[in-house]
Amino acid sequence: MLFRSLVAAAALLVALPAAAQESGAAIQTAAAAFVKPTNAERMAVIVDQLTAAGLPHQLQTFEGGNPRTGPMAGSNVVVTLGDGPKDIVLTAHYDAVKLRDGSMSQGIVDNAGSVLAMIEAMKTLKGQTTGHRLIFVLTDQEELGLIGAKAWLESHDKSRIHAVINADVAAYGRTVMYGENNGAQSGFVLTALRSQCAEQAVNCIAFPVYPPSDDRVFSAAGVPVVSLGTQDAIGAHQMWLAFNGGEDNGLKEGFVPPVFQRIHSTEDKLSYLNGEDVARFGRFIADLTLRLDRTAP
Ligand SMILES: [Zn+2]
């Protein structure tokens, strides 16, 4: 009996990393589908992947565009899980940036990786009982000025929002970066995040100054929000120095952290994505969601 349960326990220990590897490989394959010539086609890829995962979704179409592009319709993809008097909102933009030569970036690091992590979080959270309604908003036109996030928030009762988790630039690395520059109302979100980093022994780096993403739409409206990204440990440290190190940051004159050389260029490629890292980040987001679900109100 003892021997049997030992064998069972050993099988479990082996099974967990195997499952992680499996979802890592699946994410690697799923990411390849995001390489498309238009954002409308990227949206169709998400719709297909959500359908395949049994995740019901809605499209929110809006009139977007900016002075540079002219009027341009956009579409957010929205997945709602569970119910409750208040909402936890999870955002990641799926649109890729148009390059100077008119072609589209592959948009893998920025930001298919985060979208895939969010889909992984949805799979984890689906069917779990939460005290909050969970709303995933995969936004369009972030690159044109956070337009999809603005359109979504305008159509939503912001007093219902308990907290928002945004993810941008997350395709590899196990260091979680987060911004502290989203207002005092976001303090409890940061407290929950820091506790989770400590308890799970995840290397997390706080950025007093963190680059803007869809999170700014929510903080501008006074909504509690945190923006997350991932990097390898060295890349995260270099990013921290570039944004927060001041004049004496120690970086060479003209040094640009590798991730900023990649995004918004032809270098933002599928080959940078690490499926296992993305799967891990997706579970991290799901855990943070559950942790925020337990914080009142
Ligand atoms: Zn981005």
Image: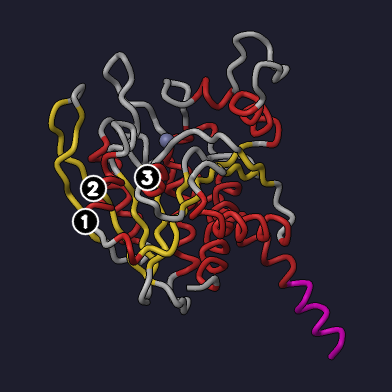
Residue 182 pos. (x, y %): 48, 45
Q: Would residue 54 be counted in the magenta stretch? A: no
> Which of these two is toward me, 54 or 233?
233
> Residue 151's mark?
2
Residue at left 67%, top 25%? 245
Residue at left 61%, top 23%? 242
Q: Give the residues drawn in magenta, as a range.
A: 1-11
Dot 2: element: helix
For disc 3, the marked residue is 220
Residue at left 37%, top 40%? 34
Quadrant location of residue 53?
bottom left
> How many residues crowd mark 2 within 10 Å: few (<14), some (14–19), many (20+)?
many
Q: CA distance from mark 2 to mark 3?
A: 14 Å
Dot 3: element: helix
Q: Quadrant of ligand 1?
A: top left
Cβ atoms under marks 1 and 3 closer than 8 Å = no
Cβ atoms under marks 1 and 2 closer than 8 Å = yes
102 vs 223: above or below: above
For residue 95, side relative to residue 40 (left or right): right
